[in-house]
Image (tube, rainbow, N blue to C red):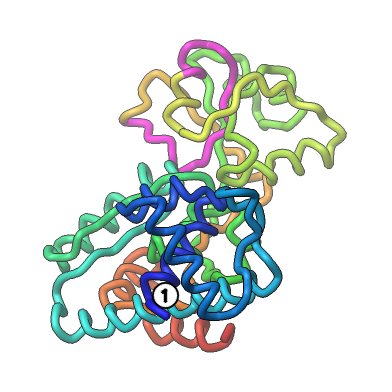
Amino acid sequence: MKLQQLRYLCEIAKQGLNLSKAAKSLHTSQPGISKQTQLLEEELGVDIFVRNGKRIVKITPPGEAILKIAGKIIQDTENLRRVSQEFTQEAGGTLTIATTHTQARYVLPTVIKRFTACYPKVKLILRQGSPTQISALVTSGEADIAIATEAIESFHELVMLPCYEWNRCIIVPPAHPLLKLKKLTLEAISQYPIITYDFAFTGRSKINQAFESRGLSPNVVLTAIDSDVIKTYVELGLGIGILAKMAFDPKRDKHLRSMDASHLFEPSTTRIGISRNNYLRNYIFDFIEMFAPHLDKTTVNAALQEHI
């Protein structure tokens, strides 16, 4: 049994049982992966995959158990490498952060600037996607931490650590009728076309819940995953925007006006997601504390131990 064979198994599963994609991802040949997989099955005496000709169509019950163990072995191998680097390359390494556009664009820049000043030899990689996508990146070992608001709690392999609460604002063009109201209401907002986040992003469920609780059906004419896209179409007059408050900057967004909407919607909580199976380098603990000062190394380790 070879470690390489276990990597092949895990990659085949990750690529939806597509051998050609697995081979491409691992920079090897499809026949090579197929042969090594079959050799491992012969050694173990069980079929890991169900095949239809040369095509893999399903994972067998023993294959599911084997894949789970193989994944843990691969993760532990990576952890061994990280332990070694902690003592041989103390100041260097890589930190991969999976996050949403809003976090990457409006929250992380100041943290990253501070972090890179402290750790100039650490290579930073930002991977953007939906909360579900970025959580999956951490559980698969492709990212070290996830930073998001929605969906992250559905990944049981992750320990979720609350960082901060935030709410929303309504953005409109200058001289919009809503600006004349003494008190902003959901009823007033629902009279206009609305541009806001896609369902999978940035607290959209809180927005839906607020309107539903008042029996209102807002006219959402456009959804986007990017705060800047929302602002662009509001500026064009396509509708009013419901935006994360952190994403509006009066100095940059001079052609728009913002109204606080925190009294209309329940606050959302941004969390950091960490795999309980990953070994964390010291600089990762430091990054987490820079992002959320209450999450020091002792607190994070305690949370990880609690979920073992």
Q: Is residue 254 left or right of residue 46?
A: left
- The answer to which of 148 and 97 lies nearer the viewer is 97
Q: Is residue 142 magenta?
A: no
Q: Where 267 sits versus 47, above or below?
A: above
Position in image of residue 186 (x %, y %): 73, 32
| Type of amino acid under label 1 | Ile
Q: Where 174 sits versus 136, above or below?
A: above
Position in image of residue 281 (x %, y %): 29, 77
> Can the viewer see residue 206 in this picture?
yes
Q: Is residue 238 left or right of residue 8?
A: right
Instruction: Please report the residue visible at 14 percent of the width from the left and 78 percent of the height from the top.
Output: 89
> Can the viewer see residue 267 in this picture?
no
Query: Where does the magenta region start and end?
Result: 233-251
Q: Is residue 248 magenta?
A: yes
Question: Which residue lies under the disc numbered 1?
Answer: 74
Position in image of residue 306 (x %, y %): 57, 87
